[in-house]
Image: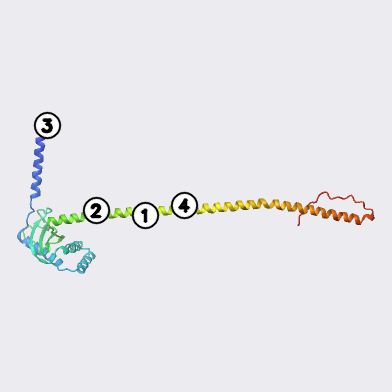
Amino acid sequence: MSRKKISAFLLAVLTALCLLALGGCSAEPKAADQATADLCFSQSDAVFQEVFSTTSEKGIEEKVSLYQAQKDETNANLYQAWRNAKPDLGQYNSVKSYRVYETEDSSEYLKYYACEITYAFKDRDLHAKVIYDGVSVTSDGAAISAEDLKVAAASMEAEFTYVEKIQKALMNTLLGMGTVFMVLIIISLVIGCFGFGRKIADNRIAAKNAAINAKAKEQAAKALEEEKKVAAVPAAVETEETTDDDELIAVISAAIAAYEAEHADTGYTGGLYVKSIRRVGRA
């Protein structure tokens, strides 16, 4: 098979797949019979009308807390959705449209129904949806009853125009980017403060080191002066001691001479002379 034929074959296959995908996307869900549709609508509208009757913020919060305490997440989430959508709606007017259809989970013996209701409010419409648990299909074709419909999930959302959605998306983008830039600016300022604080700490350390060096130099100068004084003191003491020793020798010699003169008649001929004097330590 040539390359051109292979390319044509692949193009045909892709075209067929695209057509099948478009056909699947355009397929509408199977509408419920009129009796089932009326019953599902009445049940769903009763649920939403009860929610709409709670208008105060305090009342909505009490309902949310009550259902959360009862572990009823379906109703708790429904009241939370009503709290989020209420500021954009305005005054309630009426039911605008509704439809009931079988979901894709339905089978031959078990039917899952979804009810979508559009409510008209003063400022914009509200899209509400309820999905019911599977309802068993009886062999005799008997109609379902209200007891058979158990709410599996419920939601509501205010309907915005395309322009409003674009504006909201742009606003969210600007807020997100602005928040990111603000955080980056704050981080930059914090980092800058770290550098400023480090500079202050370095200046304090330098000043402290300068004071320590000045004090060390002052102490060294004082120590040098003390060494000079200590070196000068022994010389003076030695001179003083030498002078005192000469005087002491003269005094002792004079005393000995006087003793000899005094005892000359006893036959003492002298001959004693002072050769050296040594100081005796005191006890």
Q: From the viewer's perspective, tell me whether residue 184 is left or right of residue 214.
A: left
Q: Circle 2 is placed at which residue position?
A: 177
Q: Residue furthest top?
A: 2
From mark 2 to mark 3, how far is it between C-alphas? 50 Å
Q: From the viewer's perspective, tell me whether residue 6 is left or right of residue 235.
A: left
Q: Secondary structure at mark 1?
A: helix
From mark 1 to mark 3, how far is it between C-alphas? 68 Å
Q: Circle 3 is placed at which residue position?
A: 3
Amino acid type indicated by mark 4 = Ala
Of residues 128 and 265, the one drawn nearer to the viewer in this rendering = 265
Residue 43 in view of the camera: no
Indicate how the structure is coloured in the image.
rainbow
Q: Position of residue 280 (x, y in %)?
A: 78, 54
Crowd tier of the residue under label 4, counting other residues whose Cα lies within 10 Å: few below 14, some 14–19, many 20 or above: few
Amino acid type indicated by mark 1 = Cys
Q: Position of residue 12 (x, y in %)?
A: 8, 38
Q: From the viewer's perspective, tell me whether residue 278 is left or right of residue 4.
A: right
Amino acid type indicated by mark 2 = Met
Of residues 191 and 164, the one drawn nearer to the viewer in this rendering = 191
Closest to the camera, between mark 1 and mark 3, is 1
Q: Mark 1 or mark 3, which has the lower sequence index?
A: 3
From mark 3 to mark 4, how far is it between C-alphas? 81 Å
Amino acid type indicated by mark 3 = Arg
Q: Circle 1 is placed at which residue position?
A: 193
Closest to the camera, between mark 2 and mark 1, is 1
Q: Secondary structure at mark 3?
A: helix
Q: Kindly check if marks 2 and 4 are in contact, taking CB atoms under 8 A apart as contact.
A: no
Q: Position of residue 146 (x, y in %)?
A: 10, 64
Q: Toward which corner of the image does residue 96 lie, by quadrant? A: bottom left
